Image (spheres, coloured by chain):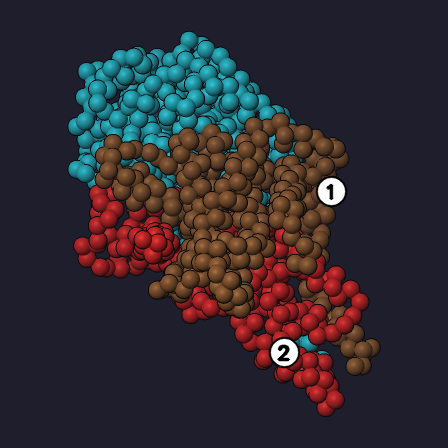
Chain colours: A red, B cyan, C brown
Amino acid sequence: MKKIGMYAMLLFVVIISVFPIIWVIISSFKTNAEILSNPFSLPTSINFDAYIEVFEQYDMMLYTWNSFIISTIASLIALLCFAMGAYVIAKYNFKGKNLFYALFTLTLLVPGHTKAQPIFSLIMNLDLYDKKAGLILVYISAGMAISMFILRNTFLTIPKELNEAAEIDGASFLRIFFTINLPLAKPGLATAGILMFLNNWNEYFYAMLLTSSNSNRTLPLALSFFNEAFSYDYTKMFAALTIAIVPGIIIYSFAQEQVQQSVAATGIKG
Amino acid sequence: MRKYFALIAITCLTGGVFVGCSGEEETSSNGVKEITIPHYKIGQNVGAKFFLPQVERFNTLYAEKYKINIEELPQDGYNDKIKQLAQQNKLPALVEAGDLDWINSYIIPNKKYYDLSEFISSNEYLSDVVIKESLQYNTQEDGSVSTFPRTSTRPIGLFYNSTLYTPDKPIKDMSIDEFVQSLEDNKLAFMTGENAWTTMLFYTSLIANEEGGIDLLNSGIKNRITDFNNDVFINATTKLQEIAMRYGSSNMLGAVYADAANSFMSKNAAIIFNGSWMGGDFEQSSADKWSNGFDGTQVVSDIYPGDVAVDNVQAIGWWIPEGLPEDELEVALAFLEFINTPEELEAYVLQEGGVIPNLEMSEEFKEKQKELVLLNQLNSSVDSETNIVPAFEHVVHNSIAQEEFGKLLPKLFDGSITPEEFCATLTEKAQSIE
Amino acid sequence: MSKNRNLKWIYLFLAPSLIIFAMFYLVPIVTLFSTSLTKWDGFNAPAFIGLDNYIKLFTQDSFLISLKNLVYWGIIAGTLHVGFAVVIAFLLHKKPFGWKFVRSVYMIPNIISVAAWAMIYRFFFNNEFGVLNNLIRKINPDFNVNWFFESPFAFWAITLTWLFYGVIVTLIVFNELMSISPDIHEAAKIDGANERQITTKINLPLCKNAIATGIILSITSRIAMYETIALTTRGGPGDDTMNIPIILVNAINDMNYGYANASAVMMFLFGIMVLVIINKLFGINKEQ
């Protein structure tokens, strides 16, 4: 009896997690009339017409590319910056070290949306409104707390003796960092990188606030615009939704462990 | 040495990315002067059907000289984006209207517009064709003209599906009560999403049918209405509530314009309140929007009960921001001139309806117009007796029209607030804006 | 270690992080607090007006309703939402058949964009072709509710988009459970404790900190909830589902920056309040 209750709950979890998504994907292959008449029916035929039309009529490729390039560049730069910071915090003693670390990780407690106006003005003043670089800058900063946390822990697990031995051999500071520590920190870098990439890929709020033109529009933002454009062509709407959500799920399926571990460790939204 | 190299590499990487990403200014090749303007008349938007081909015609006519690119924005976000771009001093070379409160409080006092007076007065044809009342409205105290005046009048009425709804006499000759009685089981394509456009139009006609309503609406052009706690609004709201509860389309709660249009074009609603530009949706070329046996030829147009139509020439139109580079200004002015040529105005009226009072129409045009049953119905419904009133959305503050009205309607329609509460809340919202 | 030689490098390495911190955290937060006391439109210089923005906030219905919603959502998040997530964590910890699969799948709603999720739910709850209402209509054919657009359903529709999606809390608690030494369980079993006692007397107290963290995270994400509302109800019907971020964005769009920042300061303060209160309630030590 207890077992049944347990499995019922777990089944419930699975259903609420994947059913809405599967429903969206299935619906993207149905005609508008089929969607409206019976939400549970299966498509009568599988064709990718809606997808082709979405790609043809709208700059889906462009939006996908924008999301990809903005997320990737922001994650890579952030990774490098924060790896450097986390590395010295983990490996060296210097004045203010604990204060810096505390400040960097405390940024986790600042809800991203509260800084909307100051960041809006900052980006305006830097003349980066409606430019990819503006969004990239904001996204770099967003990953600060989680990356610092994950990367510092990673560098802490790398034995100190390696650094000491290298220093005796006369290796430079940069060399020790780039050729000894960074390669050994790969798992941590991957975890932080994937997490930041996913966050950036999904970001909507600042994309809405800081861009206006088509050429800089990211996928989640474009999606919300379709609300109007497609509002009575549900097939296309569902196809566009599918295009927006599937890449994230694919990335996740390859890096489940990292994502779950890092989420649990830092308690940040994925 | 190597470490400096690495450092330089990092700096270049970081710096390079930003340079690489920000250098996206458009470069005009082979001397074509090019501008890019964001606009919402795109995709499924009703305005797209005329606007996009018009831009194409412009680009073709001036193929070697000018080019206008359209950047897609949803209609709902257009005004906000224009405001943000203005703040960056990055307004596009052409803006169509925008948030009227903001234009009056920022663009006009700060002279952020290009003065069109010279452009209009130096061109005899243009000075003739613009509607004088509209020109006057757009002329500021110093004699400058802030936005391009209207050239056409377009009474906004309604469309009904004659297979579902068969009134005994024209709707314009009915009273509101007679209209309601004539509905029987038919539904009205209301909406509450976005700015609740179709519902807002009918609400305007209800207000106009109240004693003193017409004067009240007209007074709002100069001084925005902020007090809704009076009989006119409460009575009109009461009627709107009753009618919506009984005759509102099943999907009206949360429906955006496209949903309302869809319920009309799938026979789920018999009547939709909208302007003549919707006529394009009822042509054979729009058949892909029809479903459930809907046929555009069965659509009939009329104006509102009590012989009321909605229109307002005291309105703003296209404008050009000040301080544009010469090249862009040239393209923008060329476009304004282009869309007001007799050919384009005739094409516009043929597509979207309306009357151009100061233009002698060509014979060819008159021939073509005879075929446009719907537009003719609408135009001939309007006579000298007709009460032409400004829309509710033009006589209240922008945020009331765009946000609060639509957000409050679902509560009125599901009966969770009374008409009195509805008016009181609107009043409170409107007065907190001052 | 040759400290002096490295010091230059240490600060050079720290510099990017420090610059990012200053630009995107320190300066914005200082700006936030200082300009919340001004009338500022972004063009003209900010003019000091004291607490006027805050007074206006607290006399505006939309803000008061936001506060009320926040209290309700906060309580629901801190109890039902976290409670459900913790139960799932405990179930997963029993390692039933397929637990890894369930854990992975539960994460998916958090992997996709909140914006997309909000839109999925908008369709899911659609009265005509949405799954939920069509299911309900199989039992009660006359059921017609426009979830996101009718009082009082809109509030619950928004709530349902996140109520059961507590995978982060689940993972935090699950990790904590995994880190409990098996010796403790062995010892308890030898002392004759049954499974239920182990769960309630040993595991639950040991997860206290993890649960507290989960509660803090869950409530603070309610404070910052924007996309879910902006892409469904826009705060309506009326002001039923208003939330502070919606007020904030509207104020930015109206170029009412002082007012916008006053509302942001309130969000900030509520976040700190939640942190302090939950820590007090759970008696978490500083060592975290």
Is B78 above or below relative to A51?
Answer: above
- Is residue B243 found left or right of C113 in the rendered image? left
Q: Position of residue A63 (x, y in %)?
A: 44, 58
Q: Quadrant of residue B8?
A: bottom right
Query: Cα distance, mark 1 to mark 2?
Result: 43 Å
Circle 1 sits on which residue? Answer: C34
Number of other residues with Cα within 10 Å of mark 2, as a class: few under 14, some 14 to 19, many 20 or more? some
Task: Name the chain letter of the residue that bears numbered label 1.
Answer: C
Front residue of C217/B213: it is C217
Number of other residues with Cα within 10 Å of mark 1, as a class: few under 14, some 14 to 19, many 20 or more? some
Q: Quadrant of residue B282?
A: top left
Q: Position of residue B95 (x, y in %)?
A: 51, 41
Circle 1 SS class: helix
Quarter of the figure with the N terminus of chain B = bottom right
Is A160 above or below relative to B326?
Answer: below
Front residue of C77/B275: it is C77
